[in-house]
Image (cartoon, rainbow, N blue to C red):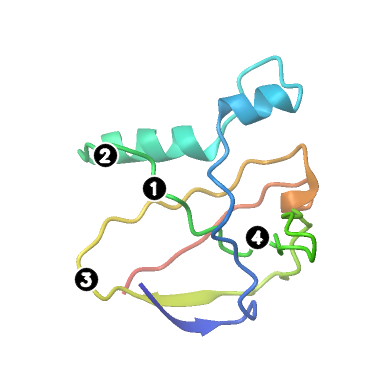
Amino acid sequence: MKIIEDSASGTHDTLLAACDRYRYELLGCKDYHRNCTDNFWEAMVDVGCKPVGLPSPFNLWQNTPVELDGTIKPNPPVTKKGDYIVLRAEMDLVICLSACPQDITSICGNKPRTAHFEIY
């Protein structure tokens, strides 16, 4: 994928793994919580794909800079309504988009949002 346009000025993350049920358990969830890992597996199986592993995500609009001491600090998003990114596929591919369901930490501003996409 090649980034063609990005109204978020590159505020994206490639360091954090997709959330999973174990992360939510560590955050204190007693009941099942939707997560990007399960969203990926369910979506891939639904379209007939048989992935052998979970790829590292490209976390669009996730604001997780590396601090001077080398730690990663998940911050609330800095994007605003209407921000967008245009990507161009440089080869055949399968994409799975999961709108982050994180509502416990501030990484999504404590409010998961819907994600919209167009393919053309």
Judged left or right of residue 36, residue 12 is: right
Find residue 85 and report its horizontal and vertical position in percent. 52, 75
Q: Identify residue for label 2.
A: 51
* Residue drawn at (59%, 47%) of the image: 100
Q: Identify residue for label 3.
A: 91
Find residue 55 and report its horizontal and vertical position in percent. 39, 47
- Residue flagged by tag 1: what amino acid is it? Pro
Q: In this rendering, which labeled residue sits more in front, label 3 or label 1? A: 1
Find residue 99 and report its horizontal and vertical position in percent. 55, 49
Q: Residues within 10 Å of mark 3 (few under 14, many from 20)?
A: few
Find residue 106 and report its horizontal and vertical position in percent. 79, 48
CB under 8 Å between discs 1 and 2: yes
Task: Please report whichever mark, 2 or 4, sits nearer to the chain's N-terminal start.
Answer: 2
Task: Please report whichever mark, 3 or 2, sits nearer to the chain's N-terminal start.
Answer: 2
Q: Identify residue for label 1.
A: 55
Secondary element type, mark 2: loop
* Residue drawn at (68%, 47%) of the image: 112
Query: Which corner quadrant of the image does residue 94 belong to?
Result: bottom left
* Residue drawn at (60%, 25%) of the image: 22
Task: Please report whichever mark, 3 or 1, sits nearer to the chain's N-terminal start.
Answer: 1
Q: Identify residue for label 4.
A: 62
Secondary element type, mark 4: loop
Q: Residues within 10 Å of mark 2 (few under 14, many from 20)?
A: few
Q: Nearer the viewer, residue 120 or 51?
A: 51
> How far apart in space, not on screen, are marks 2 and 4 (Cα)?
25 Å
> How far apart in space, not on screen, are marks 4 and 3 (Cα)?
25 Å
> How far apart in space, not on screen, are marks 3 and 2 (Cα)?
18 Å
